[in-house]
Image: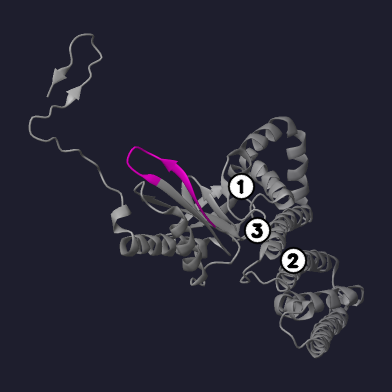
Amino acid sequence: MSLMTMIQTQMIPAHWHGLVISAALLAGAIVAGLLLYGVLFFCLRRLSKKPSTLVQSVISNCRSPLQLAFPVFAVDVVLPFLRLGPSLSGAFEHALTVTETAAVIWTLWRLAFALSDALIAHYELQETDNFKARRIVTQIHVFRRILLVVIVVLASGVTLMSFHWGRELGGSILASAGIAGIAVGLAARPTIANLVAGVQLAITQPIRIEDVVIVEGQWGWIEEITTTYVVVRIWNLQRLVLPLTYFIQHPFQNWTRHSANLMGTVHVYADYTIPVPAIREALGRIVKDLPLWDGKVCVLQVTHATEHTVEMRALVSAENSSKLWDLRCAVREKLIEFMQRNYPHCLPKARAELLGPGERLVVQSDDPGPASDT
């Protein structure tokens, strides 16, 4: 038996012995990480019983990423004690680094949702006067989406730089930063503009979630605000999608900018003989019997008069836009019914004068000369 064969025969048991020890350390680290994960979440579940608390939100959102993170970091602890070859050790360490980065990014991603969900749970959007809740929820949604974009960008950069070819690619990009920067800047200008507009909307808040708006001639509610666009739910349940920059650069109507309470008008036309005080008293009785009225505004005024009719404007208020629309329709219907029942002779009419036998209608002409008979 040659000397080389004898050396290999003696080294093989030692080599397999090192692999067995490394495998046992890896298995033990993974089991220890899972046990630590289980103990931690058991304690968290015992601390929180309400589904709306921050702890419960963390439990529901971060369970899966932490189930990966704990064993991975436990393996990182025992990595110096593993008996691996130089080449195998380098590849294993690089794979572990990438996995740790993915686990951290995944955890941060879910943690952003956990924190935002816990904050949103403190505010109820279904309440009648939900001005403050809509303001806070809008800020949370916008900043969460911006935070997610930042997390994705950082994760991509860290992962890319962990590879040799990634560092070389980064160096070549920096070497040609002049032309590449101009091209990327021009291509990403709409996206950057929308991101900046999103920050402006979150701070100044010209719109909020569930605001009642009129945009592009359409009446609807703000349903969703993302990092690049806004979804408006129109009254007929269609969706109007607009970029964030639209609400910075174009005028629009916001009916619930400071409060959900709104005032609406109802126009009714009648003859000159209509007793306005009686109609005003009837309006007061009508709105008192309607649960849609919020009890704040009830005014009737004569706002216009033509050669045939007078225009009466009823001004009423409601808690929100939906109730206001129904209230205006109900008030218009009740006023017309009251006039038909009590003052049918005061409804709009066209007057004509009939000439008796031998009478003539004299029509004045703009041209000088004698009047013409018709």
Crowd rating for badge 1 (residues with CA inside 10 Å; few <14, some 14–19, many 20+): many
Q: Residue furthest top?
A: 368
**Is 197 or 344 nearer to us in this picture?**
344
Up-down relation of residue 17 to residue 86 (above or below): below
The amino acid pointed to by label 3 is Ser
Mark 1 vs mark 2: give the one in front.
1
Count every numbered label the image shows and give the total: 3
Structural distance between the alpha carbons of marks 3 and 2: 30 Å
Can residue 360 be seen by looking at this rendering? Answer: yes
Q: x, y (%) of residue 161?
A: 78, 52
Residue at (66%, 49%) from the top-left corner? 206
**Is 291 or 138 nearer to us in this picture?**
291
Give the residue number, with chain letter if any, for mark 2: 112
Residue at (39%, 45%) from the top-left corner? 310
Quarter where residue 131 is shown: bottom right
Q: Residue furthest right?
A: 81
Up-down relation of residue 18 to residue 294 (above or below): below
Give the residue number, with chain letter if any, for mark 3: 259
Q: x, y (%) of residue 245?
A: 61, 43
Counting residues from the N terminus, which is met first, the one under dot 1 or under dot 3?
1
Counting residues from the N terminus, which is met first, the one under dot 3 or under dot 2?
2
Structural distance between the alpha carbons of marks 1 and 2: 22 Å
Q: Which span of residues is magenta-colored?
A: 299-310
The reply to whether the magenta stretch includes residue 231 is: no
Quarter where residue 211 is shown: bottom right
Q: Secondary structure at mark 2?
A: helix
Q: Secondary structure at mark 3?
A: loop
Left or right placement of residue 20 versus residue 253 in this view: right
The amino acid pointed to by label 1 is Leu
Can residue 238 be seen by looking at this rendering? Answer: no
Colour scheme in use: one colour
